[in-house]
Image (tube, grey):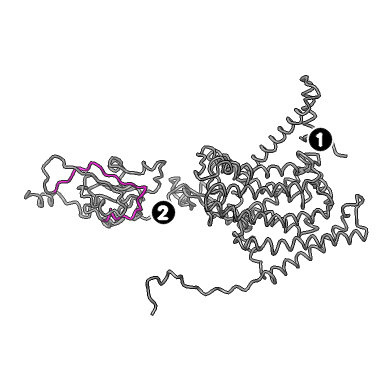
Amino acid sequence: MYGLGLFKGLGVTMKNFVSPSRQFNIVQYPNRRASPFDLAKVDNQNPVSFIATHPLKTLRSLLGLETITDRMPQHANFRGEEFAWYDSRCTGCASCAKYCPLGIIKIVTGTSGVNQQEGQSYDIDVFDIDIGRCMFCGLCVEACPYDALHMGSGFEEGKYRRSDLVINIDQLKSAEKKPSTWFRPQLTNRGHDPIKGSTADWEEVGRHEKPSLEDQSKRWAKR
Amino acid sequence: MAPTPVLFISFEILQKNFAGLIELIGFGESFKWLATLLAGISISFLIINVMVMATAFYTWFERRMIARFQVRRGPNRNGPFGMLQPFADVLKLIMKEDTIPDEADKPVFTLAPIALLAPTLMIMIVIPFGTFLHEDAFLSNLNIGILFIVGVTSVNSIAIFMAGWASRNKYAILGSMRGAAMLISYEIPMALGITSVLILSGSLAMTEIVSSQSVWFILVMPMGFFVFMAASTAEMSRTPFDQIEAESELGSGYNTEYSGIKFAVLFLAEFMAPLVTAAVVTTLFLGGSQGFDFLPGGVWFALKMFIIIFVLLWFRSTWPRLRIDQIMGFAWKTLFGLGLFNIFLVALEFSLADQFGGLASDSVSLTPEYMLIIGAINWIITIAIILIMANVVGRKKYTRPEPTPSPLANMGIKES
């Protein structure tokens, strides 16, 4: 039968319109459909007592009606927006700026006035990352020889002006350090997960274990 | 006898009241024109504001309904169920900068939104809403009402062409060229659909058309209804006939260069069109404000309008856009023929019924029994013809053409 497809299509949309089960499938962004266990977790109860005290909520959640505002499950390797940069690890070598395919990292260094010796670093005057043009490839993180720069874990960084999207050195210093485990297997091995809220100190993020005091005294005794 | 109007606003009553007021103040007979002017201004003010508010809520309703049809949410953040969304939209558009392109033809560019909005509003003059407890037109009871509608709607194509031509933009001009071709083509089936109504009703006045529908004309001639609905859907350029502003092909078509309050007016005119079309279809085919007695006529009218709007939304949310050649083919090959055939059929049946003495006492329209007989015949013929057209005439053998390699593909490589 020719031309019947039009009416089949009308049938499909009418089914969408009428049947409630199709409408339940829609959950909007900050919300997430919650099981009774999730609800109990939000309420800080154990699941059994939650089900006993809130039978209606439990029923609704089993039907898929109950939602909570929660972040969706996300991998620890997620390359997020606010970069985690460790001032004390950075030497100002500007490898990240050289490797950036878009050239959006701007570093200006100066000498500290002290005699430059081995093991000392430049003073970093400017460290700007233009997130508005960043494509989050993570090459700067791969290039960093001292594990000073890490990808972040957040993603809700909308701003009203383009100029606000440029992160400067003060913001990088003061930001909460929740580095992503992207290209940092040592963080994964140490059980670091930024999504669960764990932060990392500058001493914990390096690819080598922090030497014990004995090792330090052995290694650097000669200097 | 018409019952005494309780909540009825008409031009005559307002004029009489204003004349009394002017006399009370102390002006003489020579100031009678002032009463007419004041009554006209107040009625137009009322119509425009009611229509704008109705359109605002209609945009919300349309977005919510289509979202539901397509398993989405639609606007749901501002106010209860997102009902304040249209006001937020309008506020945003008013606050935006109103840009005019440098190359644009500025007077025409400015005039185009008004030229599009005005005819849409003017149709409302002659629609007999059957306002509470009274069977009459809202503003004016023209005796050539339907002719007025046909004439006024054809201004739309000029307005759309003005908008596209004045903006000096290739997408706009493409959209408006398509629009001009399409709107002018679909005028003809629309007029043919109306003509078949006129044969049965015997009058051009909208109130007469309503009162002659002892059996609703959708039951008497479904083919005319089909032709008129398809043509008027194309006239207001909605999906599946929205070639004028094909978003995926032309940016936004004729309103690409518009912004700010001008875009708001274009948008208003575009969203007012379904309401007006639904009102016209209700008057012509669904018996206007006829209904049972427990509700006033205006409510029945609104209910029928609602059903038509719902069906239009259903079509819009389901069917994809046709290509421009398919649209033109549909107008000239299918609807034009169907409309002519429908006129022939109805005229033949009308004259035969006249021979057998089926005219009602007013000697213009038929009696309900004869209308039902004609309707039964017409339903059978309509279904048969649509099936034949779809399966025999409409079926095309489609052979996929052999892919020809692009001349650029082997550039610089010499064939051995």
Q: Secondary structure at mark 2?
A: loop
Q: Is residue A155 above or below residue B96?
A: below
Left or right: A180, with A69 as reference point: left
Looking at the image, which residue is at 21% across and 52% down? A146
Q: At label 1, which amino acid type do we have?
A: Pro
The image shows residue B23 at horizontal and vertical percentages of: 79, 22
Q: Which residues are drawn in magenta?
A: A119-142
Q: Nearer the viewer, mark 2 or mark 1?
A: 1
Crowd class of label 1 (few under 14; some 14 to 19; many from 20; radius 10 Å): few
- Name the residue nearer the viewer: B370 or A13: B370
Quadrant of the drawing holding the N terminus of chain B: top right
Looking at the image, which residue is at 66% across and 66% down? A4
Q: At label 2, which amino acid type do we have?
A: Pro
Is the C-beta separation of discs 2 and 1 under 8 Å?
no
User: Which residue has dot 2 on it?
Assistant: A73
Q: How many marks?
A: 2
Looking at the image, which residue is at 59% across and 54% down? B177
Left or right: B258, with B28 as reference point: left
Quadrant of the drawing holding the C terminus of chain B: bottom left
Report the chain holding disc 1: B
Left or right: B326, with B133 as reference point: left
- Dividing the picture into quadrants, the one containing residue B350 is bottom right
The image shows residue A159 at horizontal and vertical percentages of: 40, 42
Task: Confirm whether residue A19 shows in the render.
Answer: no
- Name the residue nearer the viewer: B165 or B349: B165
User: Which residue has dot 1 on it?
Assistant: B5
Task: Confirm whether residue B72 shows in the render.
Answer: yes
Residue B381 covered by magenta stretch: no
Residue A121 covered by magenta stretch: yes
Q: Secondary structure at mark 1?
A: loop
- Name the residue nearer the viewer: B92 or B70: B92
